[in-house]
Image (spheres, grey):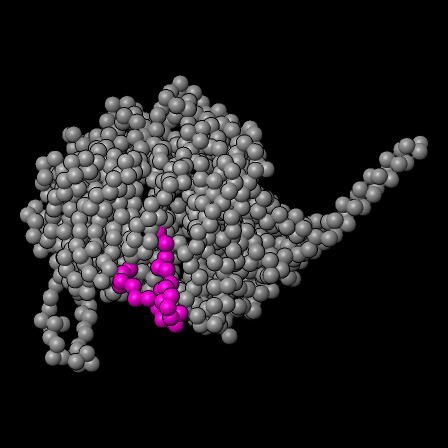
Amino acid sequence: MKKNYYVWLFCALLLSGSEAWAQQKRSLTHEDYDGWESIGGSTLTKDGRWMGYQISPQEGDGRLEIVASGDLQKRYVMPRVKNWSFSAAGGFAVGKIEAEKDSIRMLKLRKKKEMPKDSLFILNLATGNAEKLPLVKSFSMPEENAEWLAILFEKEPAKTDPADSTKKLKTPKTDGTRLELRDLKSGTKKEFERVLSYGFTKQGDQFYYVQDKADTLKNTGLYLVDLKSGAEKAIDTEKTGYFGVNFSEEGSFLTYLTTLDSAKAKKPYYSLYLYEVKKGQLNKVADEKSPGLMASGRLDKASAPYFSKDEKRLHFGVLEDYKTFAYEEDTTILDEDRVKLDIWGWQDAEIQPMQLRNARREANKTFLAGYSIKDKRLYQIGEGELNSVAASRNATHPFGIATDDSPYRRSYSWDIQIGRDVYLVNLETGAKTLIGKNMSGVPQLSPTGNFAAWYDSRDSAWYGYEVKTGTIRALTKDLDVAFYNELHDSPSLPGSYGSGGWAEKDGGFIVYDKYDMWLLDPSGRQAPVNITKGEGRQKMLTFRRLSIEKEEEGFSMKTPMYLSAFHETKKDNGFYRLDAAKKASPQEILMSPHRYVGFAKAEEAEVYTVRRSTYQEFPNIYLTDANLQRMEQVTDANPWQTGIKWGSVELVDYVANDGSPLQGLLFKPEDFDANKKYPMMVYFYERNSDGLHSYRSPAPSASTVNIPYFVSNDYLVFVPDIKYELGLPGPSAFNCIIPGVQTVAAKGFVDTDNMAIQGQSWGGYQVAYLITQTNMFKAAGSGAPVVNMTSAYGGIRWGTGMSRMFQYEQTQSRIGGTLWEKPLYYIENSPLFYMDRVNTPVLIMHNDEDGAVLGTKESKCLWP
């Protein structure tokens, strides 16, 4: 009996202690935001022995943490790191350290012009020894094999005369600075002076550097260093500058642009050179006078030349030649007397605000050109309106895709889904083959270059193109399944669910429906195969292929693939494995009420990482295995959250006024008591219920709801989904939001006299509409709303220069017609015309530099 008493007493004390701890939890305050941490993407060494990641507060100095995957207690912490990387062999970590943000802020407040320069750390991962170097401008390491490091330092302060400390020694005028080349393994170093730029071959066996002038151009030059022998060689000297220096894939060649024109020349011309490393041979490849290139063209300094992966071709950019106008060149005219005129014309491809916004881009439009190294032949690829050429630099085939939307560009103000003429481009010759005119999709080439595939939004089907024959095949048109977004609810054409990439050796192309994965044969010989066996649709799981390894030549169908899985209604998330070669069904690996992101694998080891979150659990990084059965937490961001009242979230199922089933997110305060009455905030933007397990960091916002702050301070927050009917964006909001609010209120724990509503931008418009239809909210917050669709229709989105017409006719505003075709729809959906009904106090926020919704006459505060 006495023993039982002690047990009871211990339990009572434990419970009372727990209650006391719970009572010690505090609510979030606005002072918490600055220190709230986020984690940048993690990086594994190739052998998987080390992992690094950056943790940064919203304001203040962050840190780099490096952890041994085999011993999580072994970790190194470096403060204020902004750029870093592991060495190729994984023996070192190197990065830049910036000055403390508080120090920089104080210097700026004191109007100081000189800011502290960055430092560099070199961390030996085996010993933990860290070396720090001051005044570092940049650093670089090769991608593979070698453990070399190049460090470019900032300009050093002028030295004083030893004989007279008040005088500074005269030094040669140069923009170059000291560069140190270091072998991280042996510790050997070599220094170079007056360096402007530098770089390694991918393999780390060769190194170049560009040396700047010192009072005269006679000592400028481009130099090559053999890192195995240490031999150094001048490639080119005494030029004004060397730009876009680049090695080929295997380091056989080096290319660059240079000029003899003065550095002050307003219209300089550049020449392209090619250096063959093994032979030591330098050749001038092209300049503005070279035959084979665009007439009246010049080489583009800003477009760095690059090689094809097989080292057979060199590609570079060509600009239109400088244009000279006598009026502009006339030095007898004063600036105040010069006339500037913009002429608007209906026949222009773009409206004037777009032209002005895009003027610089158009003036610097670059056209791709090529050079056959074996044949020593130049050829133009892009030209005229065909300046957009997509070509993978990792491809082993000689093809690219070029597009031209100029015949349809004039319609862009009201039809943002204009077509484009699409061409197959031979990157070895510049020859172009028309694939199709006025196409709605852009083909994606297979790794072999034998096929291409794309989604056509006009008939919601996937198509294939055979390069050899020029044959186009409809690959999914006859399948009784939708490949378009089934939840699409705007007047535009619905997009696809995307694709999962090409299998190697043209083994097929994976595309998605809402739930499942299909393997398409672009040749048309094999019928499409649902490789997930329809289990996605049957189980309401969305399957998507995960790419966790390098797949430059496509993925292997012989190797089991990882799939992400998401349950449509439960919102559970996880992973499956699919052995498509055995025609097996997807096998579950892990499913749980979490959100998983960032699943990754070390390049040369079976070491995996993943990030996992819930509303309550920050998305920390976990080490795991191939089956995701072992979960070792690596990071612990925001550990102080355990002392803060955080709350919880749950799904709410409800029915819209039109009978449609919908879901919403209900966030509840910590220690929620169903017998109490809580004030409730209502927030919305399109659909959000899929984010049930997303973590939400407390942060200041423009005019969205800071959910953790409200919940921590004993508010309910409800976030309903919205399903739109075309032409009725305002009534649709009412149809979906109000029944959701009523469903939650009917549970009995909502203080219905203290409910508020808030939305931003599109959500702000809907807030403005809703308070003209109901008085159920005590207050409203409407951020950047448009209250008059009739005047907003012809407005300009100054961020892009586009007319707002497309927004109403095709996209988010969802009217589905012009102001003249559907005038009543514009009026009926505009809150302005029902302002006399508003009794709800409302707070409105606008920003004059909002590129989408300016605080102009159609959207400023018009309410009493």
The one of 179 and 508 positioned closer to us in this rendering: 179
Whole-percent x, y for residue 544 in the image: 42, 34
Furthest residue to the left? Answer: 291
Q: Is residue 158 magenta?
A: yes
In the image, which residues are magenta? 152-175
Residue at image point 35% right, 33% down: 145
Furthest residue to the right? Answer: 1
The one of 709 and 310 positioned closer to us in this rendering: 310
The answer to whether 851 is drawn above or below residue 166 in the figure is above
Q: Is residue 289 magenta?
A: no
The answer to whether 215 is drawn above or below residue 551 in the figure is below
Residue at image point 52% right, 40% down: 128
Q: Is residue 240 left or right of residue 113?
A: left
- Does the image show residue 572? no
Whole-percent x, y for residue 228 in the image: 29, 35
Count of marks overlaid on the render: 0
